Image: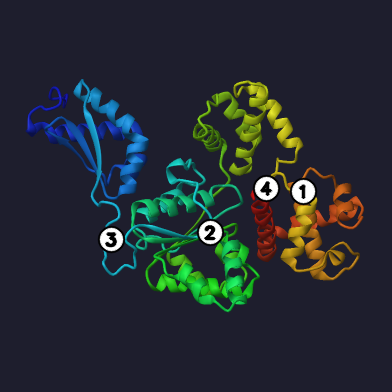
Amino acid sequence: MSLRVGSPGGPLEHGDSLAVALEERLRERLGTKDFDAWFAGTPCRYDPSGGFVFTAQTPFRTKWIETKYAGMVRDLAKELCEGEVEILFESVNAPNLPKDPGDRRPATGALSGNGALHLELEDFVVGPGNRVAYAAATAVVEHPGKTYSPLCLHGPSGVGKTHLLQGVARQLQETSSLAVCYSSSEAFTNSYIEAANQRNLGSFHARYRECAVLILDDIHFLAGKKKTLSEFLSLVEHHLDLNNQVVLSSSVDPSELAGLPPRLLGRFRSGLITPIEVPNFETRVAAVSAMADRKDLRLPSVTAEYLAQHVTENLRELEGALNCLINIARLHQSPLTLEMAKIALDEFLDLGHGSPAGGVGGENIIEVVLDHYEMEAADLLSAKKVRTIVRARQVGMYLARQLTPLSLTQIGSLFGGRDHTTVLYALRQIEKNLPGDQRLRSEVETVRSRLSVAHLR
């Protein structure tokens, strides 16, 4: 039995049937899971003037559905009505209007903190390893302070944590009048130290407390910094007591962060703690294709698949490989072919970029290790067997092996002229202890993260 009632503008009494028919076709095309995620709470109605209207609950959902699904909806409606038909998307709540007069909000959305926001939620590539984290981020945008506060995302470097945090901050800035504070934990630490040294914590508190949304990236950086960590814990409790939205990211599960009291961990768990995993092959293909699209470049599927097959650990590294390909292709005045990708990837890996941080040198690692463990180079490179010095030295050797193309002999020379067997022993010690030593994992990921940040500057 057909539900079609002729061309758009048909009898009003058939409008409901048309809307139901279009929704059923959407469900069939998308699958129940995706349909329920985006259209179950977005009712469709037929307008007698000749079109379908979808009404979403928030401006963000409206924009997302229109961006991702407008073409599909239009094609299905055209097929249903056997002719062109207008499709409209609207939201129940207009942006920039406070729903609660008691909220501390400026007249328009405001952003404070450190650094510009370059990443958007709509550009995030969703896959099996990040689907829950992405769904939670969109829920925060739609209902800030009411669902998943705090939201804490954790996972290794380069899997999309910063993308989601920046996307949430930017979306809330654009579609609400909430005051948003976004910052990296390193910038947070530097701001605190500067304010404390100048005896001017008032300005620091004004920046990080007088907002309705607090977003802090890479909180594992705070591990071991007692005063800064204490300030962070006080800040988070302040916002949670006010039912504000808090969003955090870390390279490790918050339960593994040294110095986090059980009381606050319990409050973290009252929101949502969810991992982001290393992207699978299909997600990497989609991600590198999306990166090329944002640069207005055509990346053939065979080239995208080649890059995704050989650069497997994180998306930041994958973007580096793509940039290398683009530069080489421009040099040869060639399109982004498979042949160019093979040349580019060989050069990319030869430069030592096959690591998560990419382009990190041995001297960079020593510099960051010295700063993190607060010791002198003479001690790190000496023959001293003090436990803290040995730990720092082994972590440095491990990251040098992970992040650079240096051989065992070269790493030994870098760390005070040791032979390759000493380096090999250090690597095995770190690899053996990483799974069961949460403090060691936190130290390794913190140093790795700081190397990545330093390289991107």
- Going from N to C along the chain, the mark reached first, 2 or 1, is 2
Whether residue 428 is visible to the viewer of this picture, yes or no, is no
Q: Are marks 2 and 1 in contact (CB under 8 Å)?
A: no
- Front-most of 444 and 350? 350
Which mark is in front, 2 or 1?
2
Label drawn at residue 357: 4
Residue 112 lies, with reference to residue 37, above or below; the image says below
User: In x, y percent, where is residue 246?
Assistant: 44, 63
User: In x, y percent, where is residue 267?
Assistant: 46, 70
Q: Is residue 300 left or right of residue 361?
A: left
The residue to which callout 3 is attached is 98
- Going from N to C along the chain, the mark reached first, 4 or 3, is 3
Real-space Cα separation, disc 4 to disc 1, in angstroms:
10 Å
Label drawn at residue 266: none
- Going from N to C along the chain, the mark reached first, 1 or 3, is 3
Whether residue 397 is visible to the viewer of this picture, yes or no, is yes
Quadrant of the snapshot with the N terminus: top left
Residue 119 lies, with reference to residue 292, above or below; the image says below
